[in-house]
Amino acid sequence: METGRSGPPRTAPAPPPGSSTRPEAGGLDALAVTTLRGVGPRVAERLDRLGIRTVQDLLFHLPLRYEDRTRVVPIGSLRIGASALVEGEVELTELGRGRRRALLCRIGDGTGSLTLRFFHFNARQQETLRRGRRVRCFGEVRAGPVTTEMIHPEYRIAGDADEEPEEDRLTPIYPTTGGLHQLRLRALTAQALAHLAEPPASGTGLIEWIPNEVLRRFRLPSLPAAVRYVHRPPRGASLAELAEGRHPAQRRLAFEELLAHHLSLRRLRERVRRRPAPVLQGPGRLTAALRARLPFALTAAQERVFTEIRRDLALGVPMLRLVQGDVGSGKTVVAALTCLEAVEAGWQAALMAPTELLAEQHFQNFRGWLEPLGVSVGRLTGRRRGAGRAACLGALREGTISVAVGTHALFQDEVDFARLGLVIIDEQHRFGVHQRLALHEKGRRDGLYPHQLIMTATPIPRTLAMTAYADLDNSVIDELPPGRLPVRTVVVPDTRRDEVIERVRNACGAGRQAYWVCTLIEESEALQCRAAADTAVALSEALPELRIGLVHGRLKDRDKVRIMGTFQNGDLDLLVATTVIEVGVDVPNAGLMIIENAERLGLAQLHQLRGRVGRGRRESGCVLLYHGTLSETARQRLAALRETHDGFEIARRDLDLRGPGEVLGTRQTGALQLHIADLARDRDLLPAVEQAATLLLERHPGHVAPLIRRWLGEGVRYAQV
Ligand code: ADP
Ligand code: MG
């Protein structure tokens, strides 16, 4: 059974029987697979499991790989692990000795010998494969005890003077599911490809939604040509190029998929912009008061971004703005100022954080900043229950709480705001586009929609931002507060643990605080927590003079928050933690960060973790501990971290070394649901995708909806907002 990521794009559910056409489509996306020969209920059910309901689905169900049966290869040139077509004369057929009974048939072609090994066989087969016969067979080449071997190859007896031609196309191997044979899929795709040849006038072809001028401009093959090529590449096609997904036909399909995604986000953005939002504009009395109370002045970058935000808020259409700012660049205070703009205009603001820990920290910060100005701040998290929660809900409904800080609990059904004018999402990479929209809907009041500000510390390379965040405007805080020193980073094998412990002793002895982060390769949270607990015990023994705390994911949120608070107040010297502290935690006195098994983490994550130190004006350090011997990639990754502190540079290198899942966060790329395109591999297409999208929107607006539907289906919420 072969399965793989290159599944089909999800199309609409099959039309109910009897209504097999859709007005603007009418092409192969309206033709059910059941119209093909050989598709009865059982096959249809198996195809359905692969997401294949229409003939178009089948055409977009791309091969995982290819086999080359177009050339007979000399046996002497076979390479272990490759699959190949060979032909030779049977030299010997015998029953194999050894633990497992097998029929062994040795063939030779003058360049070498090859053994065909069959564990399941019958007497007739033994007769067929008798000495002197010519056989042609196809299989994977393996190392054997005497000669190279093929186990259960496909084979047939070749004629005396074999006129039987080799195949003239590469053989596609499709992702499939139990009970659906490759031969069946090949037969079905052959029928589907035959439909492609039909004249467009017949209305059953694969409709080309990308206009000719775009195809020409970006030198893309036509859709039917691309589809035909990827299903049946001709003899001589480069297997290597196909395996890497770099053939123009494959890139044509990836291009169209990326275009559809990009268009859907652009369209979403247009629709949101047509909605009315409250005008949040006042004299700026509250923000002036907060600035006056801050112990620092905003950086030029913070000022610039805040000006961009203020401009949006004054427009009367919903702001949709992404603020990217490296770890420690000071996004929180910008969020607080933005909230004050809403409050001064008579509206409520909500700030949503991805974890209880972070929500609690923001709540404390906001209280300290806003309450002296007479602005009430409330907290709503999952862990709040009972009377406190009920009171908070009431106050939000009545509008006596002006700024609400919390987790996603803020947007549960029973939460009702009196006048929500602004939603801020911190550390956006944990939320997908859908959640973002749900919030937008949630805040709707009297026909007005709230403004949205999204803040992320994971810098996103521009090309990716264009695909994943094409619906958002972009601001960048590209400057750190003055006086920050780069965190001195060292890479150390864990055999030198004792020295590292000494370093912790010295740092804490000098009045600084430290983090010790335990990570494990195991995904299991339980094991991670155990490791952290064991480490805490070991460190307590080694460092009896220090006050050591432990936080991990298995603690109750209440306890996490309490321990974090103790650390924040300076009542703990060393905090042993799992990666729960990755995001947002801000304790300026912390000056040393130890990360165990650093070689197993992605750069973005390491950068986030390291960002927990270096937040004050004194020099800080980070020790990346690794276990065993470093692989070349791991060495490069850790070196990148040692050499640079620029989150954007790190994100770029991460993209090169690990792909976009790491950069955007798995959930974010998951939300994209790409089937054919691959953001890392195809990212060089993105600038052209953006231009093509603009062209389509301007000159061929009628093609936009069907193109989106082809790749994202009907069910995609954000295509319809
Ligand atoms: P992040 O962007 O990672 O969320 P924070 O908002 O937590 O960063 O800010 C990091 C630290 O820098 C906080 O302690 C914050 O009070 C401080 N800070 C923010 N802006 C400035 C500034 N302009 N000058 C000095 N310190 C600042
Ligand atoms: Mg933050």
Image: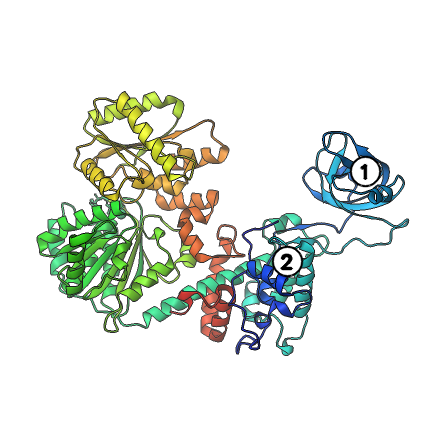
Q: Is residue 212 left or right of residue 512?
A: right
The amino acid type, in three-letter code, at marker 2 is Val
Depth order, front residue of 132/166 = 132
Q: Which residue is mark 1?
A: 105
Residue 580, position as x, y percentages in the image: 31, 41
Q: State the SS at label 1.
A: strand
Classify mark 1 as within 8 Å of ligand 1 or not, answering yes or no: no
Residue 481, position as x, y percentages in the image: 23, 44
Q: Is residue 582 above or below residue 697?
A: above
User: 10 Å neighbourhood of mark 1: few (<14), some, or many (≥20)?
Assistant: many
Quadrant location of residue 719?
bottom left
Q: State the SS at label 2.
A: helix
Can the viewer see residue 623 in this picture? no
Q: Nearer the viewer, mark 1 or mark 2?
A: 1
Q: Is residue 424 above or below residue 626?
A: below
Residue at point 47%, 68% (across, down): 714
Residue at point 14%, 64% (across, down): 398
Can the viewer see residue 375 in this picture? yes
Q: Which residue is mark 2?
A: 230
* Upstream in sequence: badge 1 or badge 2: 1
Residue at point 28%, 67% (across, down): 318
The amino acid type, in three-letter code, at marker 1 is Cys
User: 10 Å neighbourhood of mark 2: few (<14), some, or many (≥20)?
Assistant: many
Q: Is residue 42 left or right of residue 323?
A: right
Residue 422, position as x, y percentages in the image: 23, 62
